Image (tube, rainbow, N blue to C red):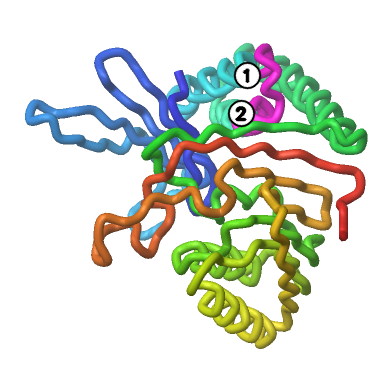
Amino acid sequence: MVSSLLWWRDGFAFRFSEPGGVQSTVWTGSCLAVRRRPDRSGCVAFARLNCAGAAGRSPDAGFVSWHVMEEPAVLVLKRAVELDSASRFQESLVCYQEGIDLLLRVLKATKNETKKAHYREKISGYMSRAEDIKKYLEKEKEDGKYHKQIKIEENTKGFSYEKLFQDYLNETVTEVWVEDPYIRQVHQLYNFLRFCEMLVKGPCKVKTIHLLTSYDEGNGKSQQMNALQEIKQSLKDYGVTLDVSYSSSIHDREIRFNNGWMIKIGRGLDYFKKPQGRFCLGYCDFDLRPCHETTVDVFHMKHTKKT
């Protein structure tokens, strides 16, 4: 079965668990299929499977033969049906779309007319279901009923701000509201700075960021205010206005985008663990940084609060 869905530069990658500890990974965007298996020493070996890309050309120049791509397509679509049955519609839609894409590649590669007719029928059915799910999710958004929950387990990696927020940021996002009482200590201020960097890099066209937080207690108040002032000035150089407000009663943590998405993280932006050292992996790249356990709730509201 599909054990994980990976992002790759040119598309998606699916990792499949198989009997005997074998794992197969397929990068759909680059038409690359590899099989991973432990060798006798316990190391991992990779073997390219039946790729038609010629030497000196990108793998996209060729295609993977239909019998190599058929099994991944079946596995991904089976997972789509499982998620669909469990009412995990957003995840099932991703699997339906990628499974259909794989099956279309199989259809293109096969020469047998009977098999082609079979694949066309299957593709039509899956496309119809995917379209129904898409319409349902759009209606949920319009009605303000959309809710997705992501559980980040203790010590897991791969949850940088880019990965967590990428599905909700697009060119329509021009205004962002951050409510987090713990943008106080140095590492928390750096977290907020990293979040702002993500917004500036796009694809959104952010013009205004509103931050509502609480004052640091004791001697850290001056450092907090100076750091936020420095972030404000730096954002101004990129044409972005930072509006900072303070509240002594704020408790809940949430992030809102003016395209209707609202993300509530149990620990706010401060869900990363402290790195083991300044020269350890994960110090700079937060995808490699272990996380504290927390829950992320995603909603889509018809109207985003602006005050």
- Disc 2 is placed on an element classified as helix
Q: Which residues are magenta?
A: 84-99
Q: Which residue is the site of mark 2? A: 95
Q: Which residue is the site of mark 1? A: 83
Q: Residue at x 31, y 13 (%)?
A: 19
- Disc 1 is placed on an element classified as helix
User: Which sits in the foreground, 64 or 162?
Assistant: 162
User: Which sits in the foreground, 193 or 261?
Assistant: 193
* Residue 90 within the segment the image draws in magenta: yes
Q: Residue at x 91, y 44 (%)?
A: 302
Q: Is residue 120 left or right of residue 160?
A: right
Q: Residue at x 73, y 83 (%)?
A: 239
Separation (CA) of disc 2 from disc 1? 9 Å
The image quarter containing residue 125 is top right
Furthest residue toward left: 41
What is the crowding at mark 2: few (fewer than 14 residues within 10 Å), some, or many (at least 20)? many
Q: Is residue 38 left or right of residue 100?
A: left
200 up-or-down from 259: above or below: below
Q: Is residue 35 left or right of residue 27?
A: left
Residue 301, percent across and down? 85, 42
Q: Amino acid at mark 1?
A: Leu
Question: Could you tell me how many numbered marks the image carries?
Answer: 2
* Residue 80 seen anywhere in this rendered image of the structure: yes
Quadrant that contains the N terminus: top left
